[in-house]
Amino acid sequence: MPPSGVRDFWQRTVGRAINAVDLRIEDEGRFEASLRQRRFGDLRLSHIDVRGTQVVRRTRGDIAHGQGGMVSVIHLLRGRGWLRQCGREVEFGSDRCVLVDSREPYEMAIFGRGESISVHMPGDWLRAQLKGVRPVVAAPYPSTSPWVSRLLDLMNTACSTASLPAASPEVLVRHFGTVFALAVASASEELPPHGPYDAAHQALEELASSPRLRAEEVAGFLGISVRQLHQAFASHGTTFRRELMELRLGRARQMLLDPRFRSLSVEEIARRCGFSDLRHFRRRFSQHFAVSPAALRQ
């Protein structure tokens, strides 16, 4: 198979198994890769072994047309890499893990032979574990932290069938959620405080489902002025209304694709995501994703 065929095949494989991405492979003549996956309730675990440098980008187009969004904790067993997301950049290797939010654009590179274990967590499950995700992505979580070390041990154990403890998937998922939350909390204590935009976005994530949400309410929640709130979004080239609409539409899309919400009508999903007008929801959804809510569900 020619190098371009290898790249395209691997990109399709990753897209089907994890998330749609734009992938560039260097040293294609020597490129080899393997992917193994396991499912534990709501979580998926991937073991990826790649012999060749990869540069991975996930764009807003990939997000709009991909199958939902997940947050992944990635631990490199071999190799080294860097991740850029949410205006931050972090290097990582075998001594630290990172969080990647596939619901936001990112760029990542892994050099040489990159063997990794990743746990992929759906957004609704993750919200039960963490108050906010954006401030903790693209940050280093060192194995010197006891809870991070415990998290990495748990991921390695779950990756090995032979050493997997005799417990139900539900028990393992609950245990992982507890250890993951403690690992993030303990490591986050040493992170620099996030900026105004991150705080504003996190507040919007928490309040987005409230119908007729106004900038004044979000500013009051944060204890800042409305002008400061608008400045925070403007600093990242966006607006309060645009961020709110993208959050609501993204959540609606995830619910429409999730079998667990199959019994809910399109109107009920729209209401749960903060839309009080069904016709307005259908129009904005179709404009944003180039498909109607009903057609997407089918």
Image (spheres, rainbow, N blue to C red):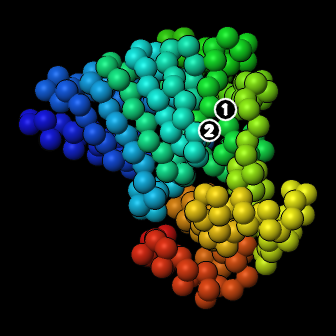
- Answer above or below: position of 190 versus 67: above
Is 158 situated left or right of 25 in this image?
right
Q: 250 or 138: which is nearer to us? A: 138
Q: What element carries label 2?
A: loop
- Residue at 72% x, 63% y is 231
Q: Evaluate whether residue 288 shows in this view.
A: yes
Q: Residue at x 52, y 47 (%)?
A: 102
Pointer 1 residue: 173
Q: Can residue 178 be seen in this view?
A: no
- Residue 258 or residue 234, whichever sits in front: 234
* Residue at the bottom extreme, as displayed: 279
Circle on res. 266: none
Image-quadrant location for residue 109 = top left
Whether tag 2 and tag 1 are in contact, CB under 8 A, the answer is no
**Image height check: is 21 above or below 280?**
above
Task: Determine the CA span between mark 2 and mark 1.
Answer: 21 Å
User: Between disc 2 and disc 1, whose residue precedes?
Assistant: 2
Q: In this view, does 159 lie above or below 258?
A: above
Name the residue: 53% across, 76% down.
Answer: 285
Please report the residue visible at 61 percent of the width from the left and 81 percent of the height from the top. 281
Disc 2 designates what residue? Answer: 137
Across and down, in percent, residue 172 comes to: 66, 27
Question: The C terminus appears in which quarter of the rendering?
Answer: bottom left
User: In the structure shown, which secondary structural element does the residue marked by tag 1 occupy?
Assistant: helix
